[in-house]
Image (spheres, rainbow, N blue to C red):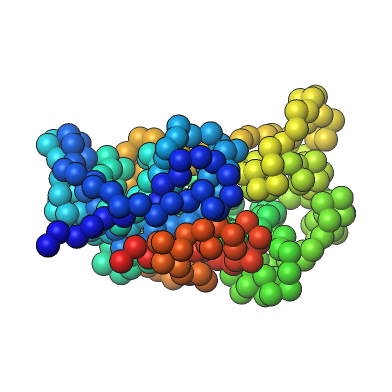
């Protein structure tokens, strides 16, 4: 008897109730593709943007952008992976919320033996995001002061550990005392708990001798944008990499000059890993930091794949810390 495969699909955008758990037939992988039997699937805030329609996608659609599993078939012309390889991926077409799927083989990276499927699914998107933020968008140097929003979240916990290991003074924001303790245990030297955006610049400057930080990593968006700019030292960099509170309103670029010749960028991971060489190099560095103990991956929530709506509800309500994964099997 053949195994029935399932995938989470949405036929319209909206709340978690639009997520449907449906039987699917992945079929044979096409040219350049591999079929992955998935063991763990990552959940990310961007999944909520896709589900809600904030980031429009053609419907009907799958959901999810990262997972880990085993290659069970390859199509013509595939050289990057072989049947039986343990692999993981982040990005590519939506559809990671599935028991098995076909995906372009050049998007897959081989997993070292020391990294489990669960860890890989919790690690890929958030870890590669932390990698490009800290190692490429604004390369953190020893002695830098950095501000990281949502320091107890999936990206935040990895970024705080990594920035501290790079020699930075790490200031983080969190919403509750429990999250503050978690952030502090993961490299965050100064934790600001429940601080209103308007009050943030004064507190950040008090922690930096009045100077401000070299870089702000802001995944919040609209509610914190102006406060983030006011936390920067002259010629500092504002990295706006997410919209958890909604998109940033239009503003006059001359304001960046007035506030200290500031730099502003709105990056996204997929440009940084579009070339396979960049993807593999970033993943190799990320895996090395996990294996040498620099990065501890905090999986705080596990749900069955069919219960993904509950995972979305908890994430949107800020009831989660660390990473959330879905278990397809």
Examine the rendering and report whether any part of residue 134 can be seen: no
Examine the rendering and report whether any part of residue 67 can be seen: yes
The quadrant of the rendering that contains the C terminus is bottom left
The quadrant of the rendering that contains the N terminus is bottom left
Q: Is residue 302 left or right of residue 224?
A: left
Q: Position of residue 213 (x, y in %)?
A: 74, 50
Q: Position of residue 305 (x, y in %)?
A: 40, 61
Instruction: Identify which residue is drawn at 32% across, 39% down.
Output: 276
Q: Position of residue 304 (x, y in %)?
A: 41, 66
Quadrant in the picture for residue 234: top right
Q: Nearer the viewer, residue 300 or 209?
A: 300
Count of marks, rendered view: 0
Q: Position of residue 127 (x, y in %)?
A: 47, 55
Instruction: Identify which residue is drawn at 53% across, 34% down.
Output: 56
Instruction: Identify which residue is drawn at 51% across, 40% down.
Output: 12
Q: Nearer the viewer, residue 33 or 328?
A: 328
In this view, 49 is above or below 116: above
Instruction: Identify which residue is drawn at 39% across, 58% down.
Output: 41
In this view, 301 is above or below 66: below
Q: Is residue 146 left or right of residue 113?
A: right
Q: Is residue 215 left or right of residue 110?
A: right
Q: Nearer the viewer, residue 277 or 93?
A: 93
């Amino acid at each position: 008897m053949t195994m029935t495969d399932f995938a989470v699909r949405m036929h319209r955008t909206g709340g978690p109730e639009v997520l449907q758990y449906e039987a699917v037939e992945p079929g044979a992988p096409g040219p350049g593709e591999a079929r992955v039997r998935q063991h763990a699937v990552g959940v990310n805030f961007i999944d909520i943007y896709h589900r809600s329609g904030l980031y429009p996608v053609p419907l009907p659609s799958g959901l999810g952008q990262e997972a880990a599993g085993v290659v069970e078939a390859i199509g013509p012309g595939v050289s990057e992976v072989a049947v039986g390889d343990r692999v993981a991926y982040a990005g590519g077409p939506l559809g990671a919320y599935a028991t098995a799927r076909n995906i372009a083989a050049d998007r897959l990276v081989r997993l070292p033996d020391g990294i489990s499927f669960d860890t890989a699914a919790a690690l890929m998107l958030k870890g590669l995001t932390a990698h490009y933020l800290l190692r490429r968008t604004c390369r953190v140097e020893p002695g830098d002061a950095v501000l990281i929003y949502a320091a107890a979240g999936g990206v935040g916990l990895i970024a705080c550990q990594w920035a501290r290991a790079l020699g930075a003074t790490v200031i983080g924001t969190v919403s509750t005392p429990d999250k503050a303790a978690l952030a502090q245990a993961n490299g965050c030297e100064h934790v600001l708990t429940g601080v209103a955006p308007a009050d943030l610049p004064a507190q950040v400057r008090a922690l930096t001798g009045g100077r401000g930080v070299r870089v702000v990593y802001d995944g919040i968006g609209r509610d914190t944008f102006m406060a983030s700019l006011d936390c920067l030292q002259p010629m500092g960099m504002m990295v706006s990499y997410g919209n958890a509170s909604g998109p940033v309103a239009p503003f006059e670029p001359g304001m960046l000059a007035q506030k200290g010749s500031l730099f502003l960028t709105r990056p996204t991971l997929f440009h940084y890993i579009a070339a396979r060489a960049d993807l593999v190099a970033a993943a190799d560095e990320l895996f090395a930091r996990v294996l040498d103990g620099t990065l501890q991956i905090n999986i705080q929530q596990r749900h069955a794949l069919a219960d993904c709506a509950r995972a979305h509800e908890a994430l949107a309500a800020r009831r989660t810390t660390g990473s959330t994964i879905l278990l397809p099997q």
